[in-house]
Amino acid sequence: MGRPHGWLFGFAVVALFIAEADAGSAGSRQVSAEGRRAISPEIAVGNDGAINVIWLDKGLTANRSAPKKRKPGEHSHRSATNLYFSRSEDRGKTWSVPSRVNPTDGEVWGFAVSKPRINVGPTGTIHVFYPANDKSPKTGLDVVSARHTRSTDGGKSFSTPTVLNRPAEKDRSELLGEGLAMTNSFGTMGVAPDGTVIAAWQDVADMADSTKGANGAVAISRDDGITFESERIALPGNAVCPCCQFTIAFGNDLTYMGYRKIYADGRDSTVARWSDAGRKFDGEGRLDLAPWDINGCPLKPTELAIDGDNVYAATYTAGEKVPALYFSRSVDGGRTFAGKRQVHPGAAYSDAPELTVDGNGAIRLVWHAKVDGPRGLFTAVSVDGGETLSSPTRIGAPPGTAAFPATDVAPDGTVYVVWQQHNEEVFIAALPAPSTVTARR
């Protein structure tokens, strides 16, 4: 059962967001190696407080090639990158030498919109999930596989990656182009409080055409990632918007997945939930946003955070009168959502949300936005169950564009933020837990 809500009582928890000076002047530090192109970071903080970061490495900065000319809206389905890892055991003061996770050079199929994921289990095992360039043993054609690897020594070494999806038997190159026959991508992974590892990805095997949807597949491990059950289709019906990356979160013995579903009137953010460690579908709730009528994939995830029966969600939508980042919440376990609000009304553009909730129920939202210059990082907090959000505060970062943040919350309530800095570098900053007082309404 979730924490009691202040609006049900004579007293309410009201935030005194003490100007969040810590956010505005947070000391940032580079995590990736100098002289290398580092993008699309992800982060996981263990129960011991150790900070684990991964990112896509695109080689030496000096070897950067000119971008290929493409038509408006056109994008590549090909990628050959590497995945790097670094760890801090002293609250971000010092970091291990960045090391490559994938055993084969150029193995990782990764973009900012389909990036690898990292989690730490209750025993300290580090789990990494990533899409990989592969060949189907059935057809011999180029495919993208869903892979998992793990480390039991603090990231000093990683196991031989396991392919989680079944071998592709169809050639979908007419759908994907560029000689790519099948993709198991745009996925996510999470570790439940009991240590169950759940990986999910999008399967386009039965997708009709580029305007239709994919299915959602999952694979589950109950032995700390040593083995996985055979994949199964958890979101059938080809109703999954095929390029909006999944997200996952856990609460009250339920597994929640954020995705964009294709409805008759739009492609909108939806939160599905399963019981029995991701085996039994338990329903879903559509966010209370105006329908986004778009005949294509907007490449926008649905970010989640869970606190008991409270489900918090944030996403970009162009369905509303003002296209922007919006926040909403559910107080009934994700069945219904209400109270939508634009997160950053003063921004020319706002997107890429990240949500955390700490042990005291404090919600922190981080995103990138354009305000009088290039994209920068901003944060807002709520200590009243999402009823109100503080005003946006800029997070300190070096000069230039700061974008695509990723966050996780430490046991002491500190939220660590990693992001992609202007010159393709990965930086990190720490945001202390917000201060609150109790006040009479």
Image: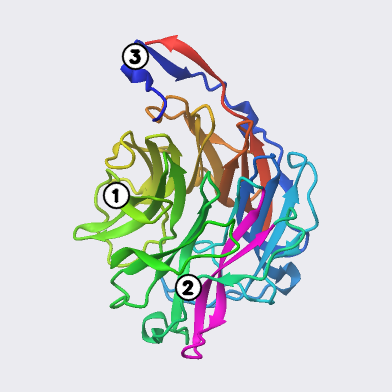
Q: As displayed, is residue 232 above or below residue 356?
A: below
Closer mark to the observer between disc 3 and disc 2: 2
Residue type, label 3: Phe
The CA span between labels 3 and 2 is 49 Å
Q: Secondary structure at mark 1?
A: strand
Please say if the residues under marks 3 and 2 sit with CB atoms less than 8 Å apart.
Answer: no
Checking the image for residue 284, the label placed there is 1
Q: In the drawing, does residue 188 fall left or right of residue 256?
A: right
Q: In the drawing, does residue 54 fall left or right of residue 129?
A: right
Quarter of the image with the C terminus is top left
Decide which of tag 3 and tag 2 comes sooner along the chain.
3
Query: Image point 47% across, 87% down: which residue?
Result: 179
Q: Which residue is at the far bottom?
A: 140
Quarter of the image with the N terminus is top left
Residue type, label 1: Glu
The CA span between labels 2 and 1 is 24 Å
Query: Image point 50% across, 64% down: which residue?
Result: 114
In this orientation, which residue lies closer to the viewer: 411 or 328?
411
Q: Which residue is mark 3?
A: 9
Q: Does residue 33 appear in the picture of this structure?
A: yes
- Extent of the magenta region: 124-151
Percent of width and height locating residue 349: 44, 48
Specify few, some or many for label 3: CA neighbours under 10 Å numbering under 14, 14-19, or 20 or more: few
Q: Does the segment drawn in magenta span residue 149? A: yes
Q: Which residue is mark 2?
A: 165
Please say if the residues under marks 2 and 1 sit with CB atoms less than 8 Å apart.
Answer: no
